[in-house]
Image (cartoon, helix red, strand yellow):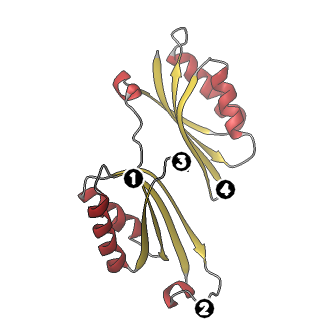
Amino acid sequence: MSSVLLSISGHDRPGIVCDVAEALLHLNANIEDSSMTALRGRFTMMLIVRLPENRSISELKAALAELEQRTRLTVQSQTISDEEASAPALEPDHVITVHGADKAGIVHAVTEALSTLGISVVDVSTQSRATESNPTESNAIKQGNVYMMVLEVAAAGQGDAMQIALDAVAKQIGVDVDLHVLDDAVL
């Protein structure tokens, strides 16, 4: 069996996931892992797909080329090793939320603190939004956009060290940073 990493993007519209799933179904390919999101009118997805023994990479590439023609999606594929394909998914154990006035460097500051501690980021979602007048917000946020970021991380027992590092980042760049232990019951 072959495993392939697919990166697919295009203008957002209803039915993209269905179109991709249908193209893979015709090959009896199994979607083993995926992440998908819409960003400002664009839809993007990454999938790890396993082909059955009786299907080839060239058949997959032909099906993906037909998908691109039919849907105007952009598809990139990369065969991954059996070792990569069988590696267990990294399980997050903490969630970090960041909120503050939008400015360059927020993602870098937070992820640099995590990287220094050897903490892996499993998932990140960010968004900048225009603020509405709110008398409880700081002046910096009242005058511009608010930046929000949520990270899922695998801290492997480093919660206390991570909290100290994140508190320092929050103070240094002037944002609110909250750390929560990820509750398996919520998922």
What's the CA distance linking mark 1 and mark 4? 27 Å
Residue depicted at x 34% and y 79%: 171
What's the CA distance linking mark 4 and mark 2? 31 Å
Vertical arrangement, residue 10 with respect to residue 21, above or below: below
What's the CA distance linking mark 1 and mark 3? 17 Å
Residue 139 position, x and y percent, is: 51, 91
For mark 3, does the 10 Å Cα neighbourhood hold few (<14), some (14 to 19), or many (20 or more) residues? few
The answer to whether the residues at label 4 and label 3 have Cβ atoms under 8 Å apart is no
Residue sitting nearer the eye, 117 or 145: 117
Residue depicted at x 50% and y 18%: 57
Vertical arrangement, residue 52 with respect to residue 139, above or below: above
Q: Which mark is residue 135?
A: 2
What's the CA distance linking mark 4 and mark 3? 33 Å
Q: Which mark is residue 153?
A: 1
For mark 4, does the 10 Å Cα neighbourhood hold few (<14), some (14 to 19), or many (20 or more) residues? few
Tell me which numbered mark, 1 or 4, is placed earlier along the sequence. Answer: 4
The answer to whether the residues at label 1 and label 4 have Cβ atoms under 8 Å apart is no
- Closest to the camera, between mark 1 and mark 4, is 1
Residue 31 position, x and y percent, is: 57, 28
Tell me which numbered mark, 2 or 3, is placed earlier along the sequence. Answer: 2
Say which amino acid is labelled 1.
Val
Tell me which numbered mark, 4 or 2, is placed earlier along the sequence. Answer: 4
| Helix, strand or loop at mark 2 | loop
Vertical arrangement, residue 71 with respect to residue 64, above or below: below
Q: List the residue tagged with mark 4.
A: 41
Q: List the residue tagged with mark 3.
A: 185
